[in-house]
Amino acid sequence: MTFFRSAALPGWFVLALLILSANAQNLGISRPRFGRSYDITSPYAIEEQEMMQKALTPGFEEDSFTFARLKFDTDMGGRYGRGRRGWQDDAPEADLSLTYRLFQVTTFKIHPGLNYVDITPKELAKYPFVYVAGAGAMAFSDADAGLMRRYLLNGGFMMADDFWGDEAWTHFYAEMKRIFPDREPVELTVDHPIFHSVYPFAKEPQIPSVPYFWRQTSYDPADYFTKDHSPHFYAIFDDKNRMMALICHNNHFGDGWEHESENEDYFKMYSEPMGYPMFINILEYTMTH
């Protein structure tokens, strides 16, 4: 199974990332830009999708970044899984908002549209970067675990997000061990280059889920014993020390993208200084190492 033309991005993409202002506190983007009815058929989204499409170079439309969301079966057991949407959490608003903001604040090309990826060789081969929402409730069959192992070892990358507490971590860890029985997640500290590749972070970013931000409480009802309330970033590496997966535990980047327009304090505290800059860091680092 072959994935993409190269594990690295084209040179123009890397250059576009490097010319960004290295100020994680102010991307200079305005809000609000859409309301609660924002979806792929809304006038806002249609206009933005057309802008991104027109910006693609004719004949080189595939030389662009595509944000792809991984579809998977969901284990809804336990307190964590109750009421969750699994892989669809924050879609489509988060996907649409993130891709347009990348288009707006950087100079690189962004492939428009929504991309929901089935775990099949044909589908996975199209996308070198997949995003996992609701990671603490995901469940892989033996066949899916084998396909994900091949995908990641052959140059693919997975960003896991949107799960909190010990119960969700235990479930996620067990599913990842089905993919890589012989590999352990390595916790990253803030001095790792991924936190400084374009935008510098003095501490690990943490984005709360919107309902709990409004209530000013922790992400209840998750249990925080071993992992506590702090953000934890883990990576899984291949034999050449290439990062194959980044795991964002006690974090909700998807809400940072989806809900950016609903509360100005949330936007200024989380979406603009953390949600978008950290994703750009992740993208630059993983696609150039």
Image: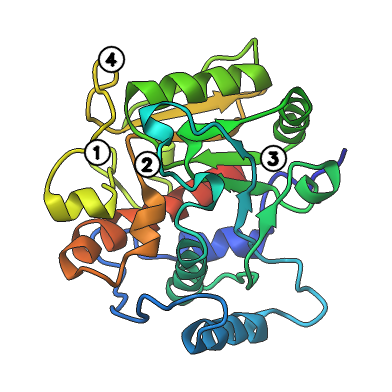
Mark 2 burial class by Cα count in 10 Å: few <14, some 14-19, many 20+ = many
Marks 2 and 4 sit apart, C-alpha to C-alpha, by 24 Å
- Identify the mark at residue 226; answer none if there is no mark: 4
First-in-chain label (1 vs 2): 2
- Mark 4 crowdedness (10 Å alpha carbons): few <14, some 14-19, many ≥20: few
- Residue position marked by numbered label 2 in the rendering: 195
Lower sequence index among marks 3 and 1: 3
The amino acid type, in three-letter code, at marker 4 is Thr
Count of marks, rendered view: 4
Instruction: Single out the mark in the foreground, 3 or 1.
Output: 1
Q: Most extreme residue toward the top, as rendered? A: 182
Image spot of residue 282 (x, y percent): 48, 46
Residue 71 appears at what percent x and percent y?
64, 46
SS for tag 2? helix
Label 3 vs label 1: CA separation? 31 Å
Q: Are marks 3 and 1 in contact (CB under 8 Å)?
A: no
| Pointer 3 local density, CA inside 10 Å: few below 14, some 14–19, many at least 20 | many
Front tag of 4 and 3? 4
Q: Nearer the viewer, residue 12 or 201?
A: 201
For the rendered model, the colour scheme is rainbow
Among numbered discs 4 and 3, the one appearing first in the sequence: 3
Residue 37 appears in which quarter of the rendering? bottom left
- Which quadrant of the rendered structure holds the N terminus? top right
Q: Which residue is mark 3?
A: 156
In the image, 120: left or right of 137? right
Residue 41, image x, y percentages: 57, 82
Residue type beneath disc 2 = Phe
Residue name at image x 52 percent, y 65 percent: 92
Estimate the spatial distance between the alpha carbons at disc 1 and disc 2, rounded to whole Å: 24 Å
Is residue 39 in view from this perspective?
A: yes
Q: Which residue is mark 1?
A: 219
